[in-house]
Structure formats: C-alpha cells, structure tokens
Amino acid sequence: MSDILNVALPKGRLGDKVYALFERAGYGCPELLEPGRKLIFESAENGVRYFFVKPSDVAIYVERGAADVGVAGKDILLEYTPQVYELLDFGIGKCKMCVCGRPDFRDDPARTLRVATKFTKIARDYYAGLGRQIDMIHLNGSIELAPILGLSDVIVDIVETGATLRENGLAVLSQVCDISARLIANRVSSKFKYEAVTQLTRRLSQVTEVK
Amino acid sequence: MSDARFSSALDGIFTKLREIYTSRGYTRYRVGRFEEYDLYAKNRSFITGSSILTFTDTDGRLMALKPDVTLSVIKNTAPSRGLRKVYYCESVYRAADPSSGFSEIQQAGLECIGSLTLFDVCEVIELAAGSLAALSERYMLDLSHLGLLDGFLEDNGVPAHIRPELLRLAEEKNSHEAMALAEKNGVPLYVMDAFNTMIHLRAPLEEAVRRLSSLPLGERAAEALSELARVAVALRGVEGIYLDLSLRCDGRYYNGIVMRGYIPDVPSPVLSGGRYDGLTKRLHRDAGAMGFAVYLNLLDRLVPEPDGTDTDILILHNGSDPEGLLRAVRALTAEGKRVRTDTAAPEGFRFGKLLHYEGGELRE
C-alpha cells in the first residue's frame, strides 16, 4: 500500500470547487490544471493523486479501496449507503431532497401514494418513517414529467433553486433532507494511512465553511 | 488467477491458522452444508444483510445452504463442563447484497463457548491477532467495547430516542451530523465533545485506554473501560491491537468486546468477531461465547502471480510419433518443467519457451 493518498473527485462544477478547497488546504496538483486528456494527476510533493469520476461512482471507488478518500454528495451516500467514513461536510453543492408535485396536490391517505424518483431508497425510507404506503416508480431522468403527465402523484428529487419546478408548474411539498458535498474515506485506508487521512481532514476543515 | 492456485494458497493459509488454533487446544469442528432454515429465520439479522439460499428437502422441510457457521456451532453445543473450544474452515453460501448473486465464501475461524473468564477473552483476541499475522506482517486488529459508547450516552442523559442514530453516526465517524442532532435535542456541548473524541480516537489499546480515562464516562462506560484496561495489560506485547470505538455490532447478539481485523490491500475487514452472549441466550444456551471468522475469499488479491506464464515449455508437434513425444515430455517434467503439447499454439496461451517436435527430436 503506497503512502500517497488517492483522491476520487466528482467530475464537473462540484469537482472544480472541491479541488480549489484541496488546493487551499495545501494539496495542490499543478498538473491537474494543464489542458489534456490525462485521467490521473499526481503531486508527489503533496502526497496526493487525483482522479475525476462520475459523481455517483465516487462512493464505489472509495468503498472498494481504489480511492482512499473522495468527495460525494449526501444524496449518493443516503441512496447507496456505502460502508465508508463520512469525515466532513464541505457545505458546498448545497441543495435539498424534496417531495414535489402540483401546488394544489392534496395527499389522500385512503389511497396508495404514487411516487416517482431516481432515489428509491431515500424515498422508501422517508415514507416508511411516515408510515405511508407508496407505489414506487423508478425513473432515470426527467422526473418532473411524472406528475405533469399523471404517471405519479409526487416526485422525490433534488431541488437546488426550484427554477425547473416553477417553470413546469410544480412546487416543493415537503423537505426530506439537506444535501451537500461530504468528504468520505475508505475504512481500511483510514487505518493504514491514519496520519495522512487525519491531517487531510483537519486541513480541509480549516478551509471549509461548515465544520 | 486460476482457481487451483488460489485454492492451493488458501490451503497454505488454513494450515497456518490450524497450527495456531490447535496450539491452544482448539479442536476441528466440521459442519454439513445444510441446516434447517428455521434456525436462520429466527436470527436473521445476525447474518448481516445477507440473503439465504433455501430449498425443500425430500421430507418437505425447508432447508438452507449454510450462510454462517457460528449459529450451527452454538445449536449443536450441548451444555457440558468446561469450555467448548472449536475451530473450523468451511464454505458458507450467501448473497452479500440483493444486487449480487449468491456465492460460496470460504471462512475459517473459531468459537469459544461456556463460562468465559477474562483469560478466555484475551486468548481469543490473541488468536485473532495471530490469525492476522499469518496473513500479513502489517495487520491491524481493532477492538471496541459495546458497553462504552452505549453506557456513556445513557449515563450522560442523552435522550433515548436519539441514541441509536448517534451510534449509527459514530460508525461513520460522522461528527458534523452527530453535533447537529445533539444540538437540536439539547445535549450539552461537553457531552458531544467527549463523544467526538471517542469516535475519532484510534490508538494502540493501552494508550487509548489511558486517553479515555480522562473523559466524563459515567458508571457503565467506566466499567467497560476497566475491562479493556485489563485486556490491554494482559495483551501487552501483542502487536497491532488498536481501540476504535466507531466499530459497532448488532447489540441484540453481541455484547462486550468486539473486533475487526485488517490487512493492507484488502479494502474491507478480513476478520470479524467478538463476544456474543446475546446470541447464545437467544438460542437458549446458558453460556457465554466469543469467536471470530476470517474471510478467506477476500484474500485472493494477496496471492502473487507466478511469472506471467501458463507453462514453461510449449511443444508443437504433428501427432505422428506419440511414443517419442511422450518420452520427451516425461524427460522435461522430470526436470521440474511445466510442459504443454499441442498441434498449434493455443490462442492467448502464455509460455516461456516454444519447441517443435519433429523427426524424434525437440528443436527450437
């Protein structure tokens, strides 16, 4: 096991923001900013190796030890419940997991509620907590269409600004949980690279808004 | 890696483990592949998150391919004088999660059942450390005591309805959400500061015990810490034993000291176990128990590739002189070479040297 820390970052805007935090914390990697098609970027000087993966895959890379640490959205952690440590809330990439539907929708407890979502575990757990029986409809995208076309009564989805909902005549009906980017770590790497992971967490917490 | 090489490597590992276990008087326990499903149905959550493979026997009984060994050992342990000390190396069958299919998992381990003394607890921990040392020089064995965090939260007046969630967050070392939950429920800051110290503390056992003793633990947690302190003294000199209170196990079965073992390059625990008096009580046995399992199936990454070839020598021939070719092959295998013969080089086959058999001779 090499001493360098393997870091899985999510591709896209969130990954760029998070990398900026790593850089401020002293884990910069100049190679990463150079244009090109490289997939792995290493700074031996700072003891880190970065790679960018699909946001929903970060937790898998970390859980299976291909990455020692990574940054994943709370939505992914709640949905897939990977066996990882959750060490820090970065307080960025903030949004909410919400139940949404037509603004005039009234839930009739006598009927099974039809719920369309990409996040079936989160939705199931939420309604189980309320003791509400639901008919789960798993969709992979364009979730907002479901209540508009009568496929479902409500949807459970991530809401950032609410603009897409408003443009489609939908509204937030209730909030399930807050979502933001989290620092996660492989449970075994955290032991064999204890000093490195602990120091990384401490330095990142110093440059992060939420501690 | 070929199954044969993995299997042979596993045999080697099990031989080492067997020597360790028999050196302390543990005897081999063999179980059949099947068990009545009822045993697992009543204790389903003991086999964490696993599906069970069932079938109907010829007499109509619902049977299961064993997903676990511990339950069978306890079920078949009659009350007797002294302790029952057994080790095993068996296959179990389960699907780790609904998305993966069923698989055969090889497990080795041991169980110590009866009126356990602190010596027995220490010996099981020492044997667990010895098992890990047989797998890797750089092993780590984490211990925890279920009474410590539970007792600390209870004795410090943390509301009962948030304790299970705090314990779940402890397992993730998730201080930020634990703090938010505690604040919402009026838990004093000094309690949460101590809680966070406890869930992030990871240090060699004796040092960890010393550091914990300065915290406002409460009576139950202090009692648990005192047990750990005695274990730490008894195991002084055994390398690689740490305390990590984020380690949790199902409290319906486990009580007291629990443990997980790790080796480098395997991303999940290769050893798991602990004190499980709760399970023996559920199975109506008036006895204490402690044991652990080593997950041999996780070790395939540790078996090195030999030299990247499937054989040392590939001999190509036209099949016209079987007697002479056999003589040539026997001579080479007698020298310890691995030899494969064929009429054409097999696709994707890796060999060290290519020879041609023609006119009763081998030529390059």
Image: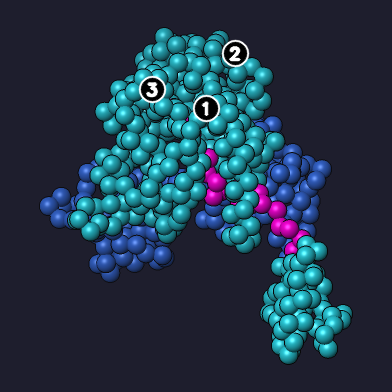
Chain colours: A blue, B cyan
Residue at the spot of label 2:
B233
Which element type, helix, strand or loop, lies under badge 3?
strand
User: Where B352 falls versus B249 (above or below)?
Assistant: below
Q: Disc 2 sits on a residue from what chain? A: B
Q: Disc 3 sits on a residue from what chain? A: B
Report the magenta residues as a range: B290-309
The answer to which of B161 and B268 lies nearer the viewer is: B268
The picture quadrant where one finds residue B38 is top left
Residue A79 located left or right of residue B240: left
Image quadrant occupied by the N terminus of chain A: top right
Q: CA separation, marks 2 and 1?
A: 23 Å
Of pointers 2 and 1, the one earlier in the residue sequence? 1
Mark nearer the viewer, 2 or 3: 3
Respond whether the residues carrying marks 1 and 3 are from the same subunit.
Answer: yes
Label 3 neighbour load within 10 Å: few <14, some 14-19, many 20+: many
Q: Residue furthest right?
A: B364
The answer to which of A118 and B320 lies nearer the viewer is: B320
Of pointers 1 and 3, the one earlier in the residue sequence? 1
Which element type, helix, strand or loop, lies under badge 1?
loop
x, y percent for residue B102: 41, 57
Residue at the spot of label 3:
B114
Q: CA separation, marks 2 and 3?
A: 24 Å
Q: Residue at x 44, y 38 (%)?
A: B29
Whether residue A156 is visible, yes or no, is no
Q: Residue at x 26, y 40 (%)?
A: B42
User: Where B327 falls versus A96 (above or below)?
Assistant: below
Q: Are marks 1 and 3 in contact (CB under 8 Å)?
A: no
Q: Residue furthest left?
A: A110
Label 2 neighbour load within 10 Å: few <14, some 14-19, many 20+: few
x, y percent for residue B361: 85, 82
Q: Amino acid at mark 2?
A: Val
